[in-house]
Amino acid sequence: MHKLILCLIIGCLMTGCQRNENLESILNLENNIQLETIFKNNCEYDMDIYYQNENNRLYLNCVDSIDISDGQTKKTLKEYIDKEDVDLNDLLKKITSNLSSDTNNENDIYKDEKIMLVSCSTVDGDKKDIIIGKSKNDHDIKKFCLPPQHTLKVTAIITELYEDDMIVESVNDSKDKYNITRISTFEKKFFENLMVGTIITFSYNGSKDLTDPPKIRATDIKIIK
């Protein structure tokens, strides 16, 4: 039994079961404090809101974990900001001071060979959307810095129907597709009347979901035919 365990450990080390250094970024901020970020493998766009205050929204793209470490203890970045009463703007300045800036873009981009921080230009003055993610040369920054959208109303046809969600495409443009995620406000009887080919109308607030098709929370769903 012990030989089997030893063989498994050796095999794991030989095949790369150890942490992939290409998916890890460590930035020295100050006084032995480090920002440790682990990225998701084989991921290009998977952006979720992580933290927000009255002036900023911080998104993570393809990030598995992001922590602050002082060598002895480790906290998530969110815990560090809240419990240590850290000013987000000051923290961002410490992060970007470790990175090279790209001034040839309308949005501020800071990156090294592993990590990237994007500060999106907005019409709201000091209010900013910040994205932290894995550095890639072929990133389409415009997908990160989407302009705010108002509530949109869409007429679409159901092309795929599952237990927890459905895929629809606009009747006006087949390239305009959405993944409608079911929520508790949806009536069970409503789903019993749905099938592939059903045409519906719905409303949703534009979001920064970068999956394809984007996952949305739809409201005011009505069956047309």
Image (spheres, rainbow, N blue to C red):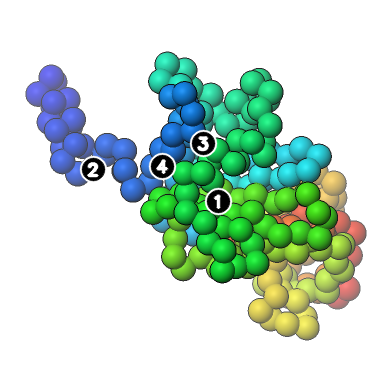
Decide: few, some or many residues near mark 4? Use Cα within 10 Å; few <14, some 14-19, many ≥20.
some
Query: CA separation, marks 4 and 3?
Result: 9 Å
Q: Amino acid at mark 3?
A: Ile
Give the residue pinned by disc 3. Answer: 66
- Badge nearest the viewer, 1 or 3: 1
Give the residue pinned by disc 1. Answer: 117
Which quarter of the rendered picture does the N terminus lie within? top left
Query: CA separation, marks 4 and 2?
Result: 18 Å
Q: Residue at x 64, y 62 (%)?
A: 107
Query: CA separation, marks 1 and 4?
Result: 12 Å
Q: Residue at x 86, y 63 (%)?
A: 150
**Label 4: which secondary element:** strand
In this rendering, position of residue 171 left or right of residue 130 = right
- Badge nearest the viewer, 4 or 3: 4
Which badge, 1 or 4, comes first in the chain's sequence? 4
Q: Which mark is residue 25?
A: 4
* Residue 159 versus residue 122 in the image, above or below: below
Q: Which mark is residue 190?
A: none
Residue lying furthest top: 72
Give the residue pinned by disc 2. Answer: 16
Q: Amino acid at mark 4?
A: Ser
Q: Count of labels shown? A: 4
Residue 194's x, y, as percent?
77, 64
In this rendering, position of residue 147 left or right of residue 77 = right
Q: Quadrant of residue 166?
A: bottom right
Query: CA separation, marks 2 and 3?
Result: 22 Å
Decide: few, some or many residues near mark 1? Use Cα within 10 Å; few <14, some 14-19, many ≥20.
many
**Label 1: which secondary element:** strand
